């Protein structure tokens, strides 16, 4: 065998050995890798199982939280339910409280009585306004007091007479309730009308006649309380009524009338109707007094008798607890009657006529 062939065979043998070794090594590596993959898979599966267990635990925890949340929600619903029930009870209580409160609604009533042919000059002018103030609270308190007096009201034997000369030098536009507990507010007092011909203010005329009436009543044995004896006062209509309530048995309020028509003249008196929400309980007594006074005045003076008229919007009447009448002596808007009322002799007749009416009322009690 030649040397070249021997070398070739040797190389081939070596190559085959190397290939065999590589094949063995490759198989070994393959088995090793497969074993490693299986181990990793086991580890991964174990890890996944752990994660799943953790997730399950978390889910259970979350379920517990949800249960707690549901429980809290239930508690909240119970709380809301109780709150709603409490609110409902509070609302019902509030409605009961509101229902229990007296609500005043003022009405300009004539109760079917014949009203004056022309509108009178409002002795208690002022725009009615709804305004809840401290004055209203005071009025409510006064209303309770008046209520007690109403229950025990009977006509008193007249010994003391209060005379109010209507109006004053300067009006007071501040507001006061139209009656005890009323939400309707009116001007406290005005300065009154003025004679169309004489130019004499109403507050001057009313005081002149009031002083004459005082003297006549004193002569007849009555005691007299003058609400005012000067022009420089500041007394509201309700304050005047309260003075009379405290000191007298009868209240005579002296005023003069007015109308757009200068031909309207005559005397009238004003009293509260049976529907008056403040003093209905003494409407009949006030009516008897008013009729007696206007009849006496017209008989003494010869003035046209316009009768006794029921009106419920006069705060000077609504605050009274004793029989009261407003005497409208004549019309300052009538030139002839205005001039007549300025005469001293005619004023004496007015005073005598009013006193005659008071006597007639007292004797008829």
Image (cartoon, rainbow, N blue to C red):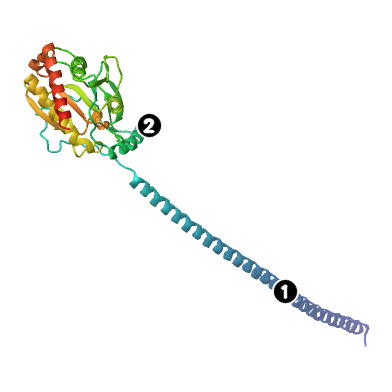
**Circle number at residue 46:** 1
Q: Nearer the viewer, residue 65 or 45?
A: 65
Query: In percent of the image, x 11 and y 32: which residue is there?
Result: 115
Query: In percent of the image, x 69 and y 73: which residue is there?
Result: 49
Kindly indicate the quadrant of the structure image that contains residue 144. top left
Query: In percent of the image, x 9 and y 20: which residue is there?
Result: 300
In the rendered image, residue 26, in percent from the top left (x then y), is placed at: 80, 79
Q: Which element is circle 1 on?
A: helix
| Left or right, residue 83 beside residue 16 | left
Pointer 2: what residue?
134
In the rendered image, residue 90, in percent from the top left (x then y), is placed at: 42, 50
* Residue 108 seen in the figure: no
Q: Nearer the viewer, mark 1 or mark 2?
A: 2
Kindly indicate the quadrant of the structure image that contains residue 292. top left
Q: Nearer the viewer, residue 123 or 345?
A: 345
Task: Specify few, some or many for label 1: CA neighbours under 10 Å numbering under 14, 14-19, or 20 or more.
Answer: few
């Amino acid at each position: 065998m030649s040397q070249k062939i021997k070398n070739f065979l040797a190389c081939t043998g070596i190559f085959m050995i190397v290939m065999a070794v590589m094949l063995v090594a490759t198989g070994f590596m393959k088995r090793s890798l497969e074993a490693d993959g299986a181990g990793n898979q086991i580890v991964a599966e174990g890890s996944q199982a752990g994660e799943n267990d953790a997730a399950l635990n978390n889910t259970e925890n979350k379920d517990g939280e949800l249960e707690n949340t549901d429980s809290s929600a239930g508690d909240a619903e119970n709380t809301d339910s109780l709150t709603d029930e409490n609110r409902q009870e509070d609302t019902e209580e509030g409605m009961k409280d509101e229902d229990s409160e007296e609500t005043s609604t003022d009405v300009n009533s004539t109760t079917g009585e014949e009203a004056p042919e022309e509108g009178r000059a409002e002795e208690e002018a002022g725009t009615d306004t709804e305004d809840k103030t401290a004055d209203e609270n005071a009025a409510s308190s006064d209303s309770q007091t008046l209520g007690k007096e109403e229950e025990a009201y009977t006509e008193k034997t007249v010994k003391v007479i209060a005379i109010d000369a209507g109006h004053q030098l300067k009006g007071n536009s501040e507001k006061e309730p139209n009656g005890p507990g009323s939400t309707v507010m009116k001007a406290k007092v005005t300065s009154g009308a003025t004679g169309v011909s004489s130019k004499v203010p109403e507050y001057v005329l009313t005081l002149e006649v009031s002083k004459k009436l005082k003297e006549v009543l004193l002569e007849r044995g009555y005691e007299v309380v003058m609400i005012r004896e000067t022009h420089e006062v500041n007394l509201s209509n309700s304050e005047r009524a309260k003075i009379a309530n405290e000191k007298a048995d009868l209240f005579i309020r002296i005023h003069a009338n007015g109308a757009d028509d200068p031909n309207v003249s005559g005397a009238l008196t004003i009293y509260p109707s049976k529907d008056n929400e403040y003093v209905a309980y003494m409407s009949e007594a006030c009516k008897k007094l008013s009729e007696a006074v206007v009849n006496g005045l017209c008989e003494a003076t010869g003035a046209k008798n316009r009768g006794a008229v029921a009106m419920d919007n006069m705060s000077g009447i609504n605050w009274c607890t004793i029989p009261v009448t407003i005497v409208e002596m004549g019309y300052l808007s009538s030139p002839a009657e205005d001039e007549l009322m300025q005469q001293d002799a005619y004023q004496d007749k007015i005073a005598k006529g009013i006193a005659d009416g008071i006597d007639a009322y007292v004797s008829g009690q």
